[in-house]
Amino acid sequence: MIATTKGLEHIVMGDSTISLVAGETGGLVLRGFDIKEVARRASYEDIVHLLLYGEPPTAAQSADLRQRLLARRAIPGPAAAVLDALPPGLPPLDALRTLLSALGDGAYPYPPTVEQGLDLIARTPTLLARYVRRSRGLPPVAPRPDLSHVANYAWMLSGSVPTSAQSDALETYFVLLADHGMNASTLALRVVISTESDLFSAATAALGALKGPAHGGAPSRVSDMLDAVGSSERAEEYIRRELDARRRLYGFGHRAYKTDDPRALILRDLAPEVAEPARLKLAGSVERVALDELHRRRPQQRLYTNVEYWSAVVLEGVGLSRDMFTPTFAAARTAGWTAHALEQAADNRLIRPDVRYVGPPAGRRWPEELARRGPA
Ligand code: ACO
């Protein structure tokens, strides 16, 4: 009898030096650096260096990488033409899927390189900002070379420079979301790279996986849930009704973490710096009630708050519309995707698992009336 594991849970598909997700203890480590150490201290650009090269940059390398990212912010002509041809009502996440594909214009052969990855990382925010503004009937905002990668993203989206609190919160969000072990989108990316396909095809596949509400599609649903609850007094009634109806609560539960998701704790701590006090109070009440109910009803499942819950509150606080939550997650994750693409290609073997066949036994005869020829 072949052993199978639904959802590949606990299957270890290889070695990686990029990030450690310690699900039992609630730890996340990027190339040896505890997420708590870097979340509020490192810039996103330096985390890109850490993930792509394996080490934090020296001061000179840091300046150099900033420059290389900055030089790539503009969108190439063919991708801009695709962007301008998109129907304006498309959700930004669907637009981004097409735009990542459009970036892969034949100039990015396998194997992936750091330079290709920097194109992906630098251009994703510009594509997103330009598409979103266009779909709202607004003119594009040109990148500003004096702003960091993350502050420039906020600038290109809104046309105003973010406050230092907003910029710092968004930067922390980008660092926290930069990489996270063998999650579903990273696996999708590595499967594509393992076939010796190109980085942009792999990133397009990864984005498709990220979109789903079981993965990166959850935070806008968290905002919807907070709206539906409306006030702290109604939290208990709402949560009970959802769980009685056997619906999942977005922003809770995680395949890896059986305790607090460390990213959620960091975002919860910084949320007061950007969130509206009333929203913060509501989010806190809903979280408390949800955890109480989940622990009471399903103690053995060990369900805790995941990163998406407080992401929603923080991203609302920095002024992002909810249709931009998952695209912004993708923009942050381009760093991790690139690191995994490089790691996969450096020691590649086709990723091709098996499946246990449990269909009808062999030996069935094809119906005569459907046969193209007589019996074999
Ligand atoms: N609310 C209510 N019940 C839940 C939740 C939840 N958020 N999460 C899990 N459960 C229940 C499941 O219904 C299941 O019960 P069952 O055995 O009676 O069917 C049990 O707990 C175990 O859940 P699994 O499905 O085995 O958990 P899995 O590891 O497959 O899924 C997942 C993890 C997808 C994140 C799940 O917890 C979930 O759907 N959460 C809500 C969506 C969400 O917040 N996604 C973002 C994840 S973070 C990220 O990807 C960046």
Image (cartoon, helix red, strand yellow):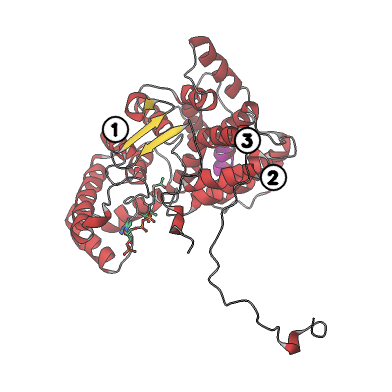
Q: Residue at x 46, y 41 (%)?
A: 329
Q: Can residue 137 be seen in this view?
A: no
x then y, percent, for residue 338: 57, 34
Q: In front: mark 3 or mark 2?
A: 3
| Structural crowding at the residue carrying mark 2, measured as other residues with C-alpha within 10 Å and reported as few (<14), some (14–19) or many (≥20) | some
Does residue 201 lie above or below 54 as drawn? below
Query: In the image shown, does 292 or 316 lie closer to the viewer?
Result: 292
Does residue 206 lie above or below 70 as drawn? below
Q: Judging from the image, what secondary structure is the residue with disc 3 in?
A: helix
Dividing the picture into quarters, in which one does residue 6 lie?
Answer: bottom left
Q: Give the range drawn in magenta.
A: 128-133
Query: In the image shown, does 23 or 279 lie closer to the viewer?
Result: 23
Could you tell which of marks 3 and 2 lies nearer the N-terminus?
Answer: 2
- Residue 82's tag is 2
Task: Determine which residue is flagged by label 1.
Answer: 270
x then y, percent, for residue 237: 20, 63
The alpha-carbon separation of the residues under discs 3 and 2 comes to 29 Å
Q: Does the magenta stretch include residue 120?
A: no
Q: Which residue is drawn at 57% across and 43% down?
A: 190
The alpha-carbon separation of the residues under discs 1 and 2 comes to 38 Å
x then y, percent, for residue 344: 58, 37
Q: Is residue 74 visible?
A: yes
